[in-house]
Amino acid sequence: MKQQFLANTFGVPLVLALVIAVMGPIRAQGQGPANFSGTWKLASADPPVPTGRGGGGGGGNNGPYAATLFAPAPDTMTITQSASTITVQIGQSKIVYTLDNQLTELPPGDVMAFKSRAHWENGALHLHNKQGMNWGRDVLTMSGGTLSVVRDLESGGGSSTRTLKYTKTAG
């Protein structure tokens, strides 16, 4: 009877405390923001980007960022990151995202401004973009030395989703 009382009184709380003590650090490790800083070179795109006419993907992206920030699979990108911002440069185009999910417009107040916002979700960085009829979302994750970007693009009634894998070349 005394053993049953002790098991019921201390057993469940003790087991629960042990589970929390073991799982807490594991959970915290996986939720910390990754550091994506560096220069990255495209290693693979799935599905591959079609070549020739119509290879732009995303239904005919156009505008000043079509060949850079809205490109279906940029060859290289440079990322710098701080606690509150992340800067992505593709070609000559550079965008600074604030990591608070607040909308940024470049230039401010322009109907055709490049609109962007960023936020963390389950350890992945989500970058959202809009310019004119072009919409994009990149979900960045890191595994070992590989940067993975799931890139969703929409424009002119068409859309595309690609998984891009990048390897670090500098930084």
Image: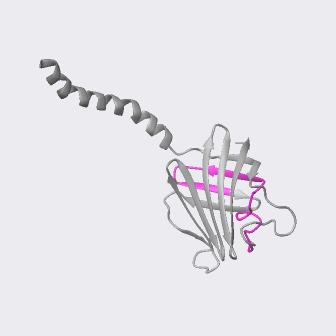
Front residue (pair 58, 6): 6
Residue numbers of the magenta segment: 61-88
The quadrant of the picture occupied by the N terminus is: top left
Looking at the picture, tell me which residue is in the foreground, 30 or 88: 30
The image quadrant of residue 96 is bottom right
Magenta part, dominant SS = loop
Residue 7, magenta (yes or no): no
Nearer to us in this view, 4 or 160: 4
Can you name the residue that lies furthest to the bottom here? 111
Taking 83 as reference, is 143 above or below it?
A: above
**Rendered position, 159 above or below 6:** below
Q: Residue 128 appears at what percent x and percent y?
A: 59, 63
Residue 52 is left or right of residue 34, and the answer is right
Q: Residue at x 86, y 69 (%)?
A: 53
The relative height of residue 119 versus residue 13 in the rendered view (above or below) is: below
**Residue 143 drawn at (x, y percent):** 62, 40
Model colouring: one colour
Residue 25 place in picture, x, y as percent: 43, 34
Residue 104 position by quadrant: bottom right
Q: Could you tell whether 43 is left or right of 1 in the image? A: right
Q: Is residue 129 above or below residue 142?
A: below
Q: Residue furthest front?
A: 1
Locate residue 80, reporting x and y percent. Answer: 64, 50
